[in-house]
Amino acid sequence: MTQSITVFMRHIRAADLCAGGTREWFSRHGFDWSDFITNGIPIEKMEATGDPLALRVTAQARKEYEDGR
């Protein structure tokens, strides 16, 4: 069984993206910003958008996961 990776605000910051722009991005993609702030978002949901900025963020989450943090 593989463990799911969850993307959090720290991954957005690590990708050098701002909260304001990310909040708009979440709205455009139908994601709940408030839920994200509280619980994060499954990496698969962000990757499914295919958006280059989302992939930049998910790369940060994967790196953290692989580094064991």
Image: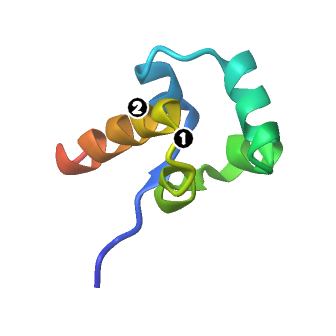
Q: Tell me the quarter of the picture where residue 69 sits.
A: top left
**Residue at 29%, 77% in the rendered image:** 2
| Colour scheme in use | rainbow
**Label 2 neighbour load within 10 Å: few <14, some 14-19, many 20+:** some
Choose between 38 and 7: the one closer to the eye. 7
Q: Tell me the quarter of the picture where residue 4 sits.
A: bottom left
Secondary element at tag 2: helix
**Residue at 33%, 39% in the rendered image:** 59
Q: Is 28 displayed left or right of 53 in the figure? A: right
Q: Is 63 displayed left or right of 39 in the figure? A: left
> x%, y% of residue 22?
67, 27
**Residue at 48%, 61% in the rendered image:** 44
**Label 1 neighbour load within 10 Å: few <14, some 14-19, many 20+:** many
> x%, y% of residue 43?
48, 55
> x%, y% of residue 67?
17, 43
Query: Alpha carbon of mark 2 to alpha carbon of mark 1: how far?
Result: 13 Å
Residue type at tag 1: Phe
Pick out the residue farthest to the bottom. 1
Q: How many numbered marks, from 0 up?
A: 2
Name the residue beneath numbered marker 1.
8
**Residue at 78%, 28% in the rendered image:** 24
Indicate which disc residue 17 carries: none
Determine whether label 2 and label 1 are within 8 Å by CB. Answer: no
Q: Is 37 displayed left or right of 32 in the figure? A: left
Secondary element at tag 1: loop
Choose between 48 and 26: the one closer to the eye. 48
Which of the two labelled residues, at mark 2 and mark 1, occupies the earlier sequence position?
1
In the rendered image of this protein, does residue 43 appear above or below residue 27?
below
Residue type at tag 2: Arg
In which quadrant of the rendered image does the N terminus lie? Answer: bottom left
Name the residue beneath numbered marker 2.
56
In the rendered image of this protein, does residue 38 appear above or below residue 25?
below
